[in-house]
Image (cartoon, rainbow, N blue to C red):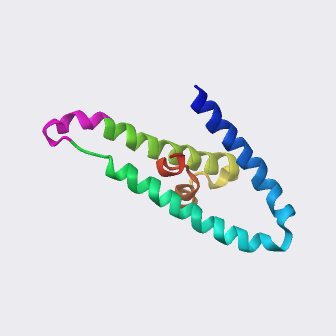
């Protein structure tokens, strides 16, 4: 529980600092952002690579992975489907609800707006 609280505190602290930093650094913020973005992507790459290195599949029990597959598929597809429904039925006027072109465009747009499992990680 202590670990969860400390991670939550760090997240909130990072959110507050990220909002105050541009005003505090002024003109030097652009150089700081470039450096911090580089470090961010290096650290994110390190995390993603180590997650992949720890992943092992026991090929003798491949049938037990089917439930995991469907859970992972639903985790990726459900936000996408919910966002496309929101885009079409909440943001578009009712006369465009049956437009195939509107659905095609919103399906593509919502694919990039939906959260992903990598983004959640």
Residue at the top extreme? 1
x and y, in percent, of residue 51 in the image:
39, 49
x and y, in percent, of residue 67 in the image:
30, 34
Q: Main secondary structure of the magenta part?
A: helix
Which residue is depicted at the point 58% across and 47% down? 83
Q: Is residue 104 above or below residue 77?
A: below
Asked whether residue 90 is drawn in magenta, I would say no
Magenta span of residues: 58-67
Q: Is residue 109 above or below residue 94?
A: below
Q: Nearer the viewer, residue 18 or 85?
A: 18
Give left or right: position of 108 versus 52. Answer: right
Which residue is depicted at the point 78% across and 69% down? 29
Give left or right: position of 106 versus 94. Answer: left
**Whether residue 95 is visible:** yes
x and y, in percent, of residue 105 in the image:
56, 62
Which residue is depicted at the point 69% across and 51% down? 91
Which residue is depicted at the point 23% across and 44% down? 57
**Whether residue 100 is visible:** no
């Amino acid at each position: 529980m202590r670990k969860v609280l400390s991670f939550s505190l760090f997240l909130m602290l990072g959110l507050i600092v990220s909002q105050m930093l541009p005003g505090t650094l002024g003109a030097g913020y652009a150089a700081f952002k470039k450096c911090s973005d580089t470090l961010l992507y290096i650290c994110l790459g390190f995390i993603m690579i180590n997650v992949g290195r720890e992943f092992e599949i026991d090929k003798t029990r491949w049938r037990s992975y089917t439930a995991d597959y469907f859970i992972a598929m639903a985790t990726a597809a459900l936000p996408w489907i919910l966002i496309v429904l929101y885009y079409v039925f909440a943001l578009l006027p009712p006369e465009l609800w049956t437009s195939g072109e509107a659905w095609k465009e919103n399906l593509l747009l919502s694919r990039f707006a939906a959260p992903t499992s990598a983004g959640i990680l």
